[in-house]
Amino acid sequence: MKFIIKYQFTSWLPQLNSQVWILGIGRCISQLGIGFTLFYTTIFFVNQLGFSATSVGLALGGASVAGILGRLVASSLCDSSVCGRRRTLLLSATLSAIAAAILAATNSFALLVIGNLLLGFGQGLYWPTIDTVITDLISPSQCQDTFAVMRVMDYVGLGVGILLGGEIVGLTGAYRALFLCNAVGFVVFFMLVYTKVTETYQPQKSSSRIKGNWSAALSDRCLLVYAIANTMAVVYASQFQAVLPLYWKNFAVAGSTIEQGFSVTTISILFGWHVLLAIVCQLPITRALKRWSPPHAMIFSTLMWALGFVVIWVTGIAPSVRLGWAILATEIFAIAAVSLTPAAVSIVNSLAPPSQRSVYFAINSLCGSLGYIIGPPLGTWVLDRSPQMADRYWLFLAASTVFTIGILQYLHRLLQQRTVVSYQ
């Protein structure tokens, strides 16, 4: 019986190169460290250290600006015979660990900015590089399933980190310890890559092709249209990760005269439930959506974000059962999140010629930085205005998905035309 259950479970998993599984474990460990701080950063710096929500949002936006630079540098380092993919990952882990240690010691706005800039640059190096390495090791037909598994590994790490972080804060109030745990996660990731991962970069015949790769990628209309839609998707995700925790903590309980919002422990449980649901749903939803084109799968994700934002608005104004609405919102956001990444990566992989893969994934990763430049500063600025604006902000986000869906529908038509031309 145990053999049958094990066989049924493993039959769901794609057959992948052993290094892909090692990288998946590395992603899990890295995200474990990030999970300790991801949903508590704004709460700590605003409510504990006394920074304004706007200033914290600007610091997070600064991390995204540094992330843009990191992603641009990553594409060059990945395709360099001197550095390559492996050393770029090691550099990313080193800088991220140092940044987390700085944030653990932060007691001034200057250190907050420095730590976020360094962390943003380190993560900017990380994302396009690890996606490129994984894509180097798989076939195009494995892309969606592989990145679905990678997202599961991400969510496992995040979920454990979020729950442990919530327990640490709930029992001790030691927010700074969370950043030290984050630093340890990056150090462990460094050791795993250093000892278990080999270089996948294959030198190109001409070094002058790097500039040509960027020029060709930036002239790819399908890629640019996709980048607009993906940036909007990241804006939505950033509201959930960086803005919603502070909203729930300070605004979510309408009409209360005793305590504003949910407790940190309640928030950690909500996000832990979100991550657990994402882990369970990632592979089934990815495979269910494979019957649709990747742009249509992203449209489904966008509709889920819109529905979730409406539910968050209800959470803020409902006279009762607010926790129930919050639970529903986290469940909807889990579906939105797991629907997005495999479809998005599949689009990039289908567009990218092998010789330009690192550049295409760098542009894809740039969407993350641009989304975070827009999302957290905008959301935290609104939270600094008034409770009424904070409540209505979620309806504004829901309405903005009409634009995103239109962009994705246009992308679907472009990809259809591209397929027809390629067959002629």
Image (cartoon, rainbow, N blue to C red):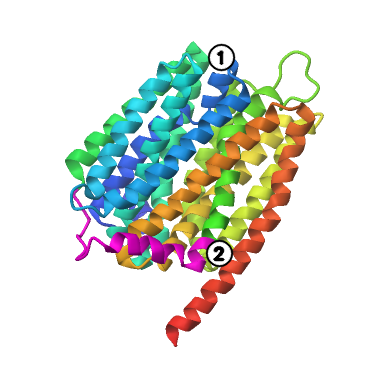
What is the distance, in whole Å, between disc 2 and disc 1 at their CAs?
Answer: 42 Å
Viewer can see residue 82? yes
Q: Which mark is residue 407?
A: none
The image quadrant that residue 48 belongs to is top right
State the residue at coordinates (33%, 52%). 75
What kind of residue is marked 2?
Pro
Query: Which residue corresponds to mark 2?
Result: 295
The image quadrant that residue 228 belongs to is bottom right
Residue 261 at x, y = what percent?
A: 69, 23
Residue 24 at x, y = what percent?
A: 33, 46
Q: Which mark is residue 48?
A: 1
- Decide: few, some or many residues near mark 1? Use Cα within 10 Å; few <14, some 14-19, many ≥20: few
Residue 322 at x, y = what percent?
A: 73, 31
Q: Is residue 374 above or below residue 321?
A: below
State the residue at coordinates (25%, 56%). 17
Q: Secondary structure at mark 1?
A: helix
The image quadrant that residue 318 belongs to is top right
Residue in front for this viewpoint, 117 or 277: 117
Q: Is residue 396 above or below residue 272?
A: below
- Give the residues in magenta: 198-224
Q: Secondary structure at mark 2?
A: helix
Residue in front for this viewpoint, 66 or 263: 66
Q: Residue furthest bottom?
A: 424
State the residue at coordinates (27%, 49%). 77
Instruction: Tell me if residue 30 is in the magenta stretch.
Output: no
State the residue at coordinates (36%, 39%). 28
Residue in front for this viewpoint, 348 or 162: 348
Q: Is residue 360 above or below residue 236?
A: below
